[in-house]
Amino acid sequence: MLTASSIAQILVNGLTAGAFYVLMALGFTLIFGILRLVNFAHGEFYMLGAFVVYHLYAQLGLNFFVALAAAAVAVGVVGIVVERVVFAPLRSRELSMLMSALGLQIAVQGIMAVLEGIEGLSLASPVSGVYRSQWITFPYERLLVVGVAFVVLAGFYGFIKHSKIGRALRAVAQDGEAALMQGIPVNRIYAVAFGVGSGLAAIAGGLIGPVFSLHVYMGQAALLKAFVVVILGGLGSVPGALVGGLVLGLAESLFATLFGGLTSDMLGFLMIMGILLWKPTGLLGRAEA
């Protein structure tokens, strides 16, 4: 039976999970919205971000937030290089780009397995302790996830809404050919979109590192969640990623409380299937003409 306390705990847990899902899905949907590419390697950029934070923060002793920012920049630059080398030559061949994304996923996993090994690693949280009240119990490290996700979302909104590059990204997302005719360097915008999307994935990976263990295969589960969120919210829709992430997080939290953790994923997927049967384009997606 749900009580006021359990409802409060469900909302808090759902918000935490949803904040992480939003952060993970934001880069994924940005890349799809601009490049029309389902980036199966997105989880690997998430994993790379976690390992960069691990080495800078846990091994070199840098401040956690400095390490997180450095991971976003470093993985973002890697993303730009990957877009230029791997995807740009295949621009007009969508199936080839899709297969390249799959190949990139396998290649990055293999390289990282050789370099880092396959054992799980632990990352100490920069904050410790648990908030307890009669209503909720809330580890501060999860509050950190929510706080950083909020700051990143606010920064991303400002970047997209008010910067020159952000306006160019929106123009290319709406109509690439029209944007090109307006003098926008579309190929550079593709690379920027891939770099920003990869950097967002790296932030998600670095944030989740102290909550769960790190390993070279951690990107697979994260990619699946990101994929579910963008399908639920609507492919290519940034507001949809925000709504989809929060809906998935809250649904999983509710089902985990009512039926246990083992069934929460299954019930969450069933709920999403029901939503998609009702609205096949996702909650905020639009049907293409």
Image (cartoon, rainbow, N blue to C red):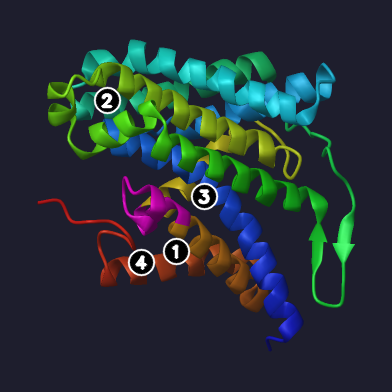
Q: Which is nearer the N-term, disc 2 or disc 4?
A: 2
User: Between marks 3 and 1, how big is the CA–CA gap?
Assistant: 17 Å
| Image x and y of residue 35, in percent | 28, 30
Viewer-proximal residue, 41 or 125?
Answer: 125
Which amino acid type is marked by label 2?
Met
Viewer-proximal residue, 258 or 77?
Answer: 77
User: Can residue 118 be seen at all in this image of the molecule?
Assistant: no
Q: Secondary structure at mark 3?
A: helix
Q: Is residue 238 magenta?
A: yes
Q: Which is nearer the N-term, disc 2 or disc 1?
A: 2
Circle 3 sits on which residue? 22
Mark 4, mark 3: which one is toward the viewer? 3
Circle 4 sits on which residue? 273
The residue at 82%/16% (across/down) is 60
Q: Secondary structure at mark 4?
A: helix
User: Where, by quadrant of the figure, is residue 271 drawn?
Assistant: bottom left
The label shown at residue 97 is 2
Residue range of the region highlighted in magenta in the rendering? 231-242
Q: Are marks 1 and 4 in contact (CB under 8 Å)?
A: yes
User: Between marks 2 and 1, how big is the CA–CA gap?
Assistant: 28 Å
| Image x and y of residue 222, in percent | 54, 43
User: Between marks 2 and 4, how big is the CA–CA gap?
Assistant: 27 Å
Which amino acid type is marked by label 3?
Val
User: Between marks 4 and 3, how big is the CA–CA gap?
Assistant: 19 Å
The label shown at residue 221 is none
Q: Residues within 10 Å of mark 3 (few under 14, many from 20)?
A: many
Seen in the picture, residue 164 relative to 211 is either above or below; the reply is: above
Q: Are marks 3 and 1 in contact (CB under 8 Å)?
A: no
